[in-house]
Amino acid sequence: MQSNKVRGLFLALGVSLCGAVASAQQNNIAQVVYSNPGPYSQQQLAAISGVKPGDPATAATLQAGAQKLSDTGFFDDIGAEIRGNTLHIVAVFKLAPTPKSQMLPVAFPNLVWLSPAEIDAAIHARVPLYFGYLQENTVPVDQVKAALEDALAAKGIAAKLEEQSIEPTLQHPFRSMAFTVVTPLPVVANVKLGGVKPEFAPLVQTSVNTAAGKPYMMGLAGLRTDDIILAPLLDAGYIDAALSGVAVETTPLDQHREPVILHATLDAGEIYHVSGLEFAGAPLLTTEAFNASAKLHAGDVASNKALIETLTPLDLAYRKLGYMDVIVKSNPSRDTAAHTVAYAVTVTPGEQYRLSKITAMGLDPAAQADFDKNFLLKAGDLYDPTYVAGFIKNNTALKTLAPYYGGYKAIANPDKHTVELELKFYTGPTVNVH
């Protein structure tokens, strides 16, 4: 868990330090100021610290307030001092909020029982400084999880949630943190769509059948139930296909599963063809190499599947060399009259990340020894998520690792451009791993 710092308190009232302390002990605070509050309001901070005008101007008062602010888990450092004079004493808290760059945006992919407003209210009741971002492995993460489980319990749902990091993909290029219900797991039981024209019925029926029985997901591009339902249309060139008026209906089954009926209206739009595909080239992939591997060409139906396959080699060229924040964009330019689309592909590499620490958990001594010998990535190496995923998938090639399955979590430090890699291995019945 994150270790926040509360700096030593310096008391000054415009006189000597000893005299200041003595005066401070005899006077009360007239004003409280929070310096460098970041995204937090003075009112929010005052409610947490509890320090208010009229309180004794003592080190103990400031220390208690600073500690309460530190305990929120949203500050890297906190200092406090008393300024002014005996006629107007000002308590100043000097704050160093955890930078947003060190946090991840938060998603709630399958909390089908709670509205966005209910989720927000439940979290803020427990974590008042929450603003849609959290830092990994900190106290607020556990508090948010507990708040959501309590909110569900209030509705009679004995739910278990897990927090997991969602690694970036072409469809979802930013790392995020997701709070997901694992029991009872919401699964797609039925999909009821309005607006389905007869010519779309075969495509939609195929996708609905594919979605049936799978976990219900929302919010994360590339992982949503919507993406499964729309996939055949998007791959057939209906690049604007979308669902509107999405609503879910739950039908409790047992403590393990919660069948979900999805209601929505389909708007397929029109079929588009590709009028052009351009890539200016980049240090890790030339224009010629990109064009040679492209699955999409001028004149083709604008298939989303072919577009993803076209962009993947560019994405992997960077991701394999530690460019964890690489963003590949297709930048579509539509001609709505001609129903054509031109793509101008760009890549923003970001910085390279290196492994700072590798931890494997759940292995017996023999398996751990084999892991240490055969897992080729070491601390200091460029981070390659494709190697990690491939090792876990193919670890049965090693005799001692054959009984294990597992998952991994990459904890990035965007300021230092380092990654802590945690691999978790399991034996026995399959469990949900990430």
Image: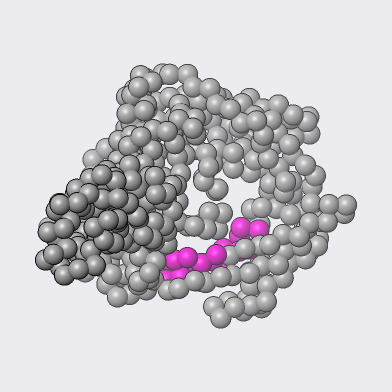
Whether residue 239 is visible to the viewer of this picture, yes or no, is yes
Q: Residue placed at 68% from the left, 48% from the top?
A: 235
Q: Residue placed at 35% from the left, 65% from the top?
A: 413
Q: Foreground residue, 23 or 10?
A: 23
Q: Residue furthest right?
A: 337
Q: Foreground residue, 327 or 103?
A: 103
Q: Residue placed at 43% from the left, 18% from the top?
A: 252
Q: Foreground residue, 16 or 254?
A: 16
Here the colouring is one colour
Specify the principal SS of the magenta part.
helix
Q: Does residue 174 lie above or below 211 as drawn?
A: below
Q: Residue placed at 50% from the left, 38% from the top?
A: 217
348 inside magenta stretch:
no
Q: Position of residue 57 (x, y in %)?
A: 20, 52
Q: Quadrant of residue 85?
A: bottom left
Give the extent of the magenta segment. Answer: 307-327
Q: Position of residue 90 (x, y in %)?
A: 29, 56
Q: Position of residue 105 (x, y in %)?
A: 45, 51
Q: Position of residue 189 (x, y in %)?
A: 52, 25
Is residue 242 rendered to the left or right of residue 24? right
Q: Quadrant of residue 204?
A: top right
Q: Foreground residue, 155 or 275?
A: 155
Q: Does residue 12 lie above or below 39 as drawn?
A: below
